[in-house]
Each structure stands twice: as structure tokens, then as C-alpha cells.
Amino acid sequence: MTSILWLRRDLRRADHPALLAARDAADGDLVVAYVLDPALWSSAGPVRRAWLAATLEATARDYGDALTLLWGNSRIVVPELAKRLGATSVHVTRETTPFGRRRDEDIANSLAAQGVSWLETGTPYAVGPGLVVNGTGTPYKVFTPFARAWREHGWPDPAPRPRDLPLRHARNDADATRALRDALTQPDLPTLPDAGEEAAHARWREFLETGVTAYATDRDLPGRDGTSRLSPHLKLGTIHPRTLLADLASRRGTGKETFVDELAWREFYADVLWHNPSSAWTDLRDALAGMEYDEPADAIEAWRAGTTGYPIVDAGMRQLLATGWMHNRVRMITASFLTKDLHVWWPVGARHFLDHLVDGDIASNSHGWQWVAGTGTDASPYFRVFNPVTQGEKFDPDGDYVREWVPELAHLAGKAAHQPWEHADGYARGYPARIVDHAEERREALRRLDAVKRGT
Ligand code: FAD
């Protein structure tokens, strides 16, 4: 009897409960498959496509070149594969996004009609979305009580890495291998991190040795390499958060506790999306219903290109374009600039981020944006307008981050890089003038908020 493991956001062998379940069910062969579904593939953008392609290459090696690559609508391809192989079960890690849930329900029904079992084991999270609820069984709406309950709920130990698997390679689709090859040879791709499970573990070990102790302070300084950079790996599941939490269990200190809190944010946003599928692209809370937004125009092009004239904003947007990643503090600053200084509705910015981020993730991205925009889980919302100059001076006090990404400001020493307009030679190397006046736009943002509150 053949069983199929259909990989999605779980491209690894270690700590993989669904792989163990598929192996145990296979009374014969185990086929491990990945489906490139054009619906997801075409919406991913070149950076995420390349990252997925590189990760799949590494995953195929980890599975002894027995990873079967398929191309097409998963609703058709997966039942067809099961039929072709005469498989008795299809195993997956449970998907929790709105798209994935709808798709999986349809596929489970099709397989049931063919007499094939559909088995979900584990999720991409330490605690499956939907499982952390309060005493009355309702989901948490605010992070801090969620994180407390999430820690109390706890998670299982990592699953052992299986050695001998009865792997069988089914035929690859030529369209799938071609799409992956093309994805890796696109022009102007940023240099991506090392891909695959081994690289994820190497990065994690490095961060455990050199980064986690000072994480609580360094994580907010974009000029330092103070964060784990694991987000692209967590996104594709080359490492599971359970593994990270197990490695941290014996450690003490604020660095470790802050890092666990950040993992909890990822879990919180997945949980929020689980309970509110429409918050992927619309306001989670309707507190700002009726808010007047501006249509994206020239200003948004300047934001996208990193030419707004505000150094920390431009540094972040250029880091995103050049590397496919942006520091968390700067994600908040650039998101605030788009929503509060340019008065653009958050999904426009969220789309741009998803198009360019290597770690682009619907739950963390949309709710990260909504946290800043004031429509999300943060209780003190729209009137928090980040000042790009004071934020820059506080979190990039030596100006190193700005100078790294904005060469037109490389001649300005220290924090002078945050205010070129204060220096006679500030614009000597062609840095653009400010496209808006922050103080004026802050007043305008608050005026619009006031109008929403008054219902005018
Ligand atoms: P570390 O600081 O090392 O944190 C470890 C892990 O914790 C991260 O890899 C991530 O999985 C999780 N984490 C950390 N901070 C957050 C957070 N604020 N929210 C949710 N999870 C967090 N993260 C994504 O993975 N994908 C996205 O598409 C994404 N979009 C964002 C958009 C905006 C507007 C904002 C403000 C934040 C967004 N984040 C997103 C969260 C955060 O910026 C990144 O997870 C983090 O910068 C990744 O770098 P790191 O792995 O070095 O993080």
C-alpha cells in the first residue's frame, strides 16, 4: 500500500509529525510530493518564487532525490496522483490560512469519494491556530493574554528525525521543474539566504551562540545583525518553531524570553487569521470604517522606490528591494509612513511587501500592517504616528543603517544622516527632497481620525 506525504509549508525531515504518520501508514511505498499550484505560484512574486525553488532543491536532496514535483491545480493534481499510484492515504501538515483551508476541504472530499483517507498531523505552529482560547472558550483578541495562555498551553517535544524511509519517486512534471529553473534564473534577484533544512539549522545554531543573549536590545537596531533571520525558513517550514522552543527551554534571560515572545506574535497572528479569515485583506476591526484614504499616486511610487526624502523610510524600502527582507522596526516605520503620512489604506502596502519579501506570510504581514494602521489587534491605534526622524535617531543612532542603504547620504556622519535638510551639503549627492511635510501630515491623519470618530 502506498501513502503520500504532500508537503506544503513543511519542507524538512526533522521534527515532522506528518512525515512520521505517513511513514507509519505506508505498508509499502511512501511518495513525498510537492505541487506547484499556479494560483499560488503566480501570486508569489519573483523573490518568493526563487526562495521556494531553492528550498525545494535542497528538500529534494534531503529526500534522496525522491521528491516528486507536480504542476497544476492541487484540487485536481492531488486526487489524480492518489489514483495513479493506487495510494490509500494522503498525509499533510494541517494548513491554517483561508486559501489553504478551503482547498484542503475540497481535496479531502474528492479523496473520500475515491476511498482515499486524508490525514492532517500538526501545523506550522507550536500550538495549532484555534487551540488557545480563554476560560469561556473564546479566542484572544489582544497579544499579551494570548501569549500568556499560549505558554501555559505548551507544545509537544520535537518529533525524531526518521532515518530509513520507504521512499518511491513518482514522475516529475516537466512544467514544475521548468518553473523552478526559471524562478532561479530571473534577472535582478536579490542574493537570497542559504536555503533548506541544513541551512536553517546552521543559522539557528549561529544565532543561539552569538545572538540570543543580546536579542532583547539588539533586535530593535536595524544597523546591527541582531535578529535571527529565520523568518524565511519558518515560512517554508525548513525549521519548526517547536525545535526552536525546545532548544531554548534550558536557557534563561531576557534575550530568550523576548525571542519566545516574538515567536508568540507569529502564532498570535496565525490564530487571529484562523478566527477571522477575512482579515487577510480587509480591516480586522471596523473602528476606522469610514476613514478617508487617498488613492495611491506618485507618492506611493516614491515610497516603493525608497525616494520619499525621509532617510530611514528610504533605507528600509531599498533594503527590501535589494535583499527581499526588511528589519522589523523599519517595517513598522515604513508602514506608518504609508498609512499615516501618505494616507493610503494598508492593503496597498501589504501587497507590495508580499511581492518583495522573501518571508512574505499572509498572517504576519496583514496583521503587522493592521497593527500599524490602527485596524488590527493593537488597542492604541491610529493616533500613534511614527515620526521618521526621531525613530531613525533612536533606533539607528549612528546612522549606519541609513548610510548602508542610501549612498546619497554616505557623506553625512553619525545621526546627521537622518536630517540632510539640516546640513549645507545634505543634498550634495543627489538625495531627493521630502515629498511631504511629516508634521503637517500627522495633523491631517489625526484630523481624519477625528472625523471618523465624529461620524462626519
Ligand atoms: P526575529 O526578530 O529573529 O524573530 C524570530 C521570529 O519571530 C521571526 O522569524 C518571526 O517568525 C517571528 N516574529 C518576529 N517578530 C514578529 C512580528 N512582529 N510578527 C509576527 N512574527 C514575528 N513576518 C513574516 O514572517 N512575514 C511577513 O510577511 C511579515 N510582514 C510584516 C509586515 C509588517 C508591516 C510588520 C510590522 C511586520 C511583519 N513581519 C512579518 C514580522 C517581522 O517583521 C518579521 O517576522 C521579522 O522581521 C523577521 O526577521 P527575523 O526572522 O530576523 O526576526
Image: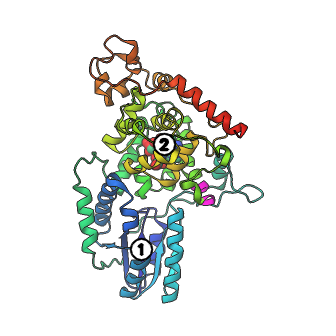
State the image quarter where residue 293 is shown.
top right
The residue mark sitting in front, 2 or 1, is 2
Would you name the residue on which mark 1 appears? 74
- Quick check: 345 above or below 107? above
Read off the magenta span. Answer: 270-276
Q: Is residue 75 magenta?
A: no
Q: Residues within 10 Å of mark 2 (few under 14, many from 20)?
A: few
Percent across and percent down for residue 43 are: 39, 59
Residue 391 location in percent, x, y? 49, 26
Q: Is residue 260 visible?
A: no
Outermost residue, front direction? 456
Judging from the image, the colouring scheme is rainbow
Report which quarter residue 405 is drawn in.
Answer: top left
Q: Secondary structure at mark 2?
A: loop
Could you tell me which secondary element the residue under label 1 belongs to? helix
Look at mark 2 in the image and give the residue it sits on.
295
Is 131 on the left or on the right of 331, as rendered? right
Is 45 located above or below residue 312 in the figure? below
Residues 152 and 359: in front is 359
**113 or 294, nearer to the observer:** 294
Q: Residue at x 35, y 49 (%)?
A: 202
In terms of secondary structure, what is the magenta stretch mainly?
helix
Quadrant in which the C terminus appears: top right
Decide which of tag 2 and tag 1 comes sooner along the chain.
Answer: 1
